[in-house]
Amino acid sequence: MGPSKVFFSDLRATASRNIFAKLLQLLHEAGIDTKVRSRNLVAIKLHFGEKGNTGFIGPIFIRRIVDKIKELGGFPFLTDTNTLYKGSRSHSVSHIVTAIENGFAYSVVNAPIIIGDGLRGSSSVKVKIDQEIFELVDIGKEIMEADVLIGVSHFKGHELTGFGGTIKNIGMGCASRHGKLKQHSDLSPKINKKKCTGCGECVAYCSQEAVSVKEEKAVIDLERCIGCGECIIICPNSAINVQWSRDIPILQKKMVEYVFGVLKEKEGRAFFINFLTQISPSCDCNRYTDASIVPDIGIMASSDPVAIDQASADMVNQQAVLHGSSLEVNTRPGEDKFRGLYPDIDWGFQLDYAQKIGLGTRNYELIKI
């Protein structure tokens, strides 16, 4: 397989050519015009940022992408799926409120917000993929029903995958709550007996009648539990939690297989953008954003999800670490910043597996505009 083309724009600007003009040129040269047709419903998959987080991509950039899609005749909407953990994006109501508070109001971005997996994260489509781990994957219904998928990712470090870019944004970010749970854990949710008050809210909402209250504490029947994760968000006392998998390579494989499921019916109709700005050491799901580990670099675009993440990681690793960041090792140009942050995580594993199952190639040609 020959190299994939990855297009790159730095952040230099002049009075006659600002960064928005460069972004539009980047999108055009990378081929977004060939992805969107008249009247297509276009899902722009991004991360709205948790409350308190400031590292997410600015709405003013999303507005330009929206306007470009409308110019091509498409009908864009902004989307993400609800989180598995408790936070400000764990159901659609608070998710949309958080997005608006973070600047993604219609008046700013010129597109509606449609959460991809419904009110509580249970609106999903099962996609048959027949891969090494999963035969079926659970993807947010609204994302699957869109004609075109545009992944817009903030490239940064990540606690479980080394970095978070296009593959993380699409694989984990397009999964329904059940799909997220299947990626993160091979086990049913667990009850924190100290926090449980025996209120019975989880019993009422469990579709499988897998939860009961015994001796004033909730109990999960593991044989009945299907791992949908709805009880996690329903519990008013935060007493039900995910049993997180500690097998990082398996988690990365699962995430990549979900990318396969998302893109299975989007051949020729998917496009990816990575923003290499405010490159923080950890995920935008946190309620804070730590100082950037390297200077802002630029923006990349490609039709290959593997190549764009490889190129992004390479470019970050070419930088010198910023003084005052949390990164204290691998600080020189050419050293692996993500292994410096998370020495036990081989971030290349996800790219190797994605290449193996045909999602793209780690071999790329970088085209600077």
Image: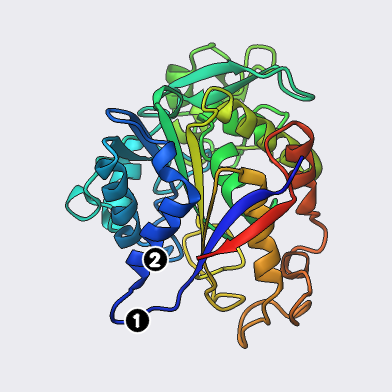
In terms of secondary structure, where does tag 1 sit? loop
Relative to 49, does residue 33 appear above or below in the rendering?
Answer: above
| Residue at point 26%, 36% (across, down) | 73
Please, is residue 12 above or below residue 104 in the view? below
- Residue beneath label 2, please? 22
The disc labelled 1 sits on which kind of residue? Answer: Thr
Provide residue 151's location: percent of width, then percent of height: 48, 44
Specify whether residue 288 is in view.
Answer: yes
Residue 340, image x, y percentages: 77, 70
On the rendered structure, is 199 left or right of 276? left
Q: Amino acid at mark 2?
A: Lys
What percent of the width, then of the height, locates residue 22? 39, 66
Q: Give coordinates of residue 185: x percent, y percent.
A: 69, 34
Residue at 35 percent across and 43 percent down: it is 95
Picture residue at 53% right of the left edge, 36% below the top? 196
Q: Where is 334 relative to 369, above or below?
A: below
In the picture as drawn, the residue positioned furthest to the left comes out as 107
Q: Secondary structure at mark 2?
A: helix
Quadrant including the N terminus: top right
Relative vertical location of residue 141 with respect to residue 19 in this rendering, above or below: above
Q: Nearer the viewer, residue 77 or 300?
A: 300
Is residue 158 at least partly visible in the picture?
A: no
Q: Position of 6 compared to 45: left or right?
A: right
- What's the mark number on residue 295? none
Binning the other alpha carbons within 10 Å of mark 1 as few (below 14), some (14 to 19) or many (20 upward) gives few
Q: Is residue 118 left or right of residue 326?
A: left
Which residue is more in the foreground, 163 or 43? 43
Q: Earlier in the sequence, mark 2 or mark 1?
A: 1
Residue 14: image tag: 1
